[in-house]
Image (spheres, helix red, strand yellow):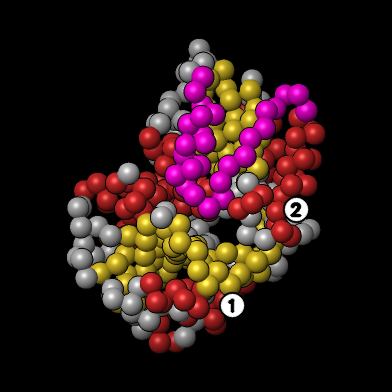
Amino acid sequence: MTNQKLPLSKLNECFQNKKINLVARSSFEARWALSLGELKNLESITILESDNISQEALETYSLIDEFFFEKSKKMKLSKSDPQKTYRQIKTSFENTFVFDSTYLNVVDISSFRREELFMALLLLKELFEANASFDCRLIYVEADNMDEDWLSRNTAEIRTVLGYSGDPMQSKKTCVISMVGHELNRVKDIIDVYDPSKLMIGRGMQSESINTVLSRRNEIFYRELSSYYGNQCSKFEFSLLDPVKVRDQLSELCKDDGYNYVIAPFNNKISCIGVSLFALENPGVQVCYSVMSEYNRSTYSTPGNHVHILDLNVFWKG
């Protein structure tokens, strides 16, 4: 099983016999702090926080028991310099993780920015390949809802994700694969910048959606985007719960060797793991990211009551 879903209140039961080293990413989204309230065997905690942390993000620290701060250390994370961000994530792993069978290394990806998540997955893969005893889980706390009016505004920059730059060839046409989430403006901006010869627009499988409210809203965005680009695009569906299935679905989409493939992943973090698995196995594929000028820090999301546990060892051993 690549993804175990359970009530958040049952999280600690899965890790009872292990001492846990945890890396988490603070955010204005309150769900980043929820796993800290459930895990009891925490040996060490590293909290990554933005170098210009917002007041809304600072306020979420009140959700954490003061006891945990005695075991934790904070590390700043750059939002403007990807090379620096990569080094900071790498340092956080090196300073937190232990390669010993009595320990379990855990990364709470709930509030990682997607660009940071892709960097983290690249680094975790390198650790896995270099250390036979490396044992790691990802945990992802669901959002129960996302703000209906807006999540982000104004694209400041579109860039390739460090470590996922691909190998574009001038002799090939460009195909953009857009995995639609809840931010229509971000998707459109990327498509317009790349101006692809071929466009594929994907939606998460409705049968795997977290809840019907989010599924219906995603369907509206998907239809609007499909209508906007009309006959210029083809459509597909992808898994929201199984990264291995996402990897395999992308493999089917990218069989034509006549294109430079660019993936724009804007759905949940679980599907992003699948994109990473595919791109790392196919280094010619590029993954892109859009940096936004403004986020809805006040009402971006509402935390859910369920958590997903993903075993990276299963992905890479397979």
**What amino acid type should be assigned to the residue bearing mark 1?**
Glu
Q: Residue at x 49, y 23 (%)?
A: 255
Residue 193 seen in the figure: no
Q: Residues within 10 Å of mark 1 (few under 14, many from 20)?
A: few
Q: Is residue 25 left or right of residue 197?
A: left
Quadrant of res 309: bottom left
Residue 165 x %, y %: 45, 33
* Residue 90 in the image: above or below residue 102: above
Residue 130 in the magenta stretch? The answer is no
> Which mark, residue 232?
none
Which labelled disc corresponds to residue 216?
A: 2
Q: Earlier in the sequence, mark 2 or mark 1?
A: 1
Q: Callout 2 environment at 10 Å: few (<14), some (14 to 19), or many (20+)?
A: few
Question: Which part of the image, by quadrant, shows the C terminus?
Answer: top left
Left or right, 53 with reference to 211: left
Which portion, as a residue range, is magenta?
Answer: 230-256
What's the amino acid at mark 2? Answer: Arg
In this orientation, which residue lies closer to the viewer: 247 or 173? Answer: 247
Label 2 residue SS: helix
List the residue tagged with mark 1. Answer: 59
Q: Residue 107 location in percent, x, y?
A: 40, 62
Vertical position of residue 246 compared to residue 257: above or below:
below
Q: Which residue occupies 62% across, 39% down? A: 237
Task: Provide residue 281's location: percent of width, then percent of height.
Answer: 38, 35
